[in-house]
């Protein structure tokens, strides 16, 4: 009797397993994975290397002003940039021009956004792998330090860890708000 | 409120959280996840945890050049270094750095960083 019960139990489990792993359910699960994987590049982590790492700060109030134009040296994020502006070179304030590689090593400072009065953390990444862009040269030095304090100097070329040391232009990516201590 | 107390409040208000200080003063080279850039920057990830468990490692971490020169006061730097140890897998019972301790270690910057690192970690620890 015990063996009969065991047989029936195993049969029920086997049938249930078969129902749960039909081709249709397999395809449904595969579809979920495929669709999910397609969505991954949209997540903030995956986007981080390509552009803004936090929701873009309010720049609407700066529209039409030099402080709101990424192609101008006066653009608010450029308060400590030194180089050619990528927005003039086929890229944007967040992205490198095609054919260049963004250096992950960078120098980081803060700029005040005149639209909301907040200090934002700005990463000045160099775009590497092509010769210098030559358009929209801009040198500003807010919070920048002399070359002997290397991590806070913007005269240095920051193409470290990239395939090429040739620098084409620089971006100004917002990393976050420089919030005060809690 | 006395002037000293007011100054202390203003000073505190101007400081950042350790996480923000890491972004501002460390992440540019050490990256958000502390990973290495081969040939340029050594890893924090893995290395900090080893150093925190190695005799002399605690002192080493507060004496490397860009830590000594960070534009932070001793209390801010103590909080930042403690955060770094916790963030990169240091032991749970790691005693927080104190401002007084940092002041003493900052006064003894490392002259030969690579040699000190080799002595602590051995092997290929030249950077």
Image (spheres, rainbow, N blue to C red):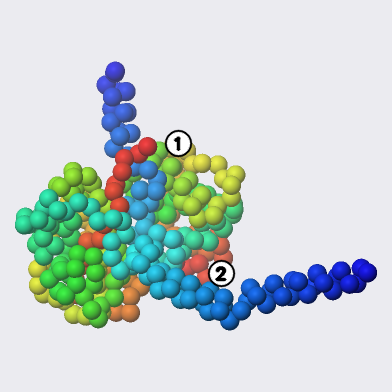
Image quadrant in which you'd find residue A16: bottom right
| Residue at which label 1 appears | B100
Q: Residue furthest right?
A: A1
In terms of depth relative to the viewer, which is nearer, A32 or A51?
Answer: A32
Q: Is residue B58 rendered to the left or right of residue B42?
A: right
Q: Chain of mark 1?
A: B
Where in the figure is residue B11, as x and y percent of width and height?
A: 30, 33
The residue at the point 27 percent across, 52 percent down is A121
Where in the figure is residue A83, as x and y percent of width and height?
A: 16, 67
Q: Is residue A77 rendered to the left or right of residue A39?
A: left
How many C-alpha atoms fall within 10 Å of the one at disc 2: few (<14), some, or many (≥20)?
few
Where in the figure is residue B6, as x and y percent of width and height?
A: 28, 24
The residue at the point 35 percent across, 53 percent down is B23
User: From what the image shows, is residue A178 above or below residue B47?
Assistant: above
SS at circle 1: helix
In terms of depth relative to the viewer, which is nearer, A58 or A77?
Answer: A58
| Residue at which label 2 appears | B123
Where in the figure is residue B114, as x and y percent of width and height?
A: 46, 63
Q: Quadrant of the C terminus of chain B?
A: bottom left
Q: Chain of mark 2?
A: B
Q: In whole angstroms, how far apart are the C-alphas of marks 1 and 2?
A: 33 Å
Residues at discs 1 and 2 both on one chain: yes
Q: Residue furthest top?
A: B1
């Amino acid at each position: 009797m015990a063996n009969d019960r065991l047989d029936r139990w195993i049969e029920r489990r086997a049938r249930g397993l078969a129902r749960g792993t039909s081709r249709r359910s397999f395809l449904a699960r595969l579809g979920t994975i495929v669709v999910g994987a397609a969505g991954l590049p949209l997540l903030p982590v995956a986007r981080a290397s390509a552009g803004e790492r936090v929701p873009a700060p309010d720049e609407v109030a700066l529209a039409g002003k030099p402080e709101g134009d990424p192609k101008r040296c006066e653009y608010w994020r450029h308060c400590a940039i030194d180089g050619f502006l990528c927005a003039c070179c086929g890229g944007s304030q967040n992205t490198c021009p095609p054919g260049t590689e963004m250096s992950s090593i960078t120098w980081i400072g803060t700029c005040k956004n005149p639209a909301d009065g907040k200090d934002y953390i700005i990463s000045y990444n160099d775009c590497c792998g092509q010769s210098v862009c030559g358009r929209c040269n801009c040198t500003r030095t807010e919070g920048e330090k002399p070359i002997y304090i290397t991590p806070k100097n913007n005269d240095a070329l920051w193409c470290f860890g990239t395939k090429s040391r040739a620098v084409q232009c620089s971006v100004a990516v917002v990393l976050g708000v420089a919030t005060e201590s809690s | 409120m006395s002037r000293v107390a007011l100054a202390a409040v203003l000073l505190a208000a101007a400081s950042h959280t350790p996480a923000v200080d890491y972004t501002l003063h460390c992440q540019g080279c050490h990256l958000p996840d502390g990973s290495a850039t081969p040939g340029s920057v050594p890893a924090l990830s893995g290395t900090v945890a080893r150093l925190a468990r190695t005799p002399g490692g605690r002192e080493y971490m507060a004496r490397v050049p860009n830590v000594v020169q960070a534009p932070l006061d001793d209390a801010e730097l103590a909080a930042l270094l403690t955060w770094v140890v916790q963030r990169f897998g240091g032991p749970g019972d790691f005693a927080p750095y104190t401002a007084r301790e940092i002041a003493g270690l900052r006064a003894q910057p490392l002259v030969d960083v690579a040699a000190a690192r080799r002595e602590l970690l051995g092997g290929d620890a030249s950077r």
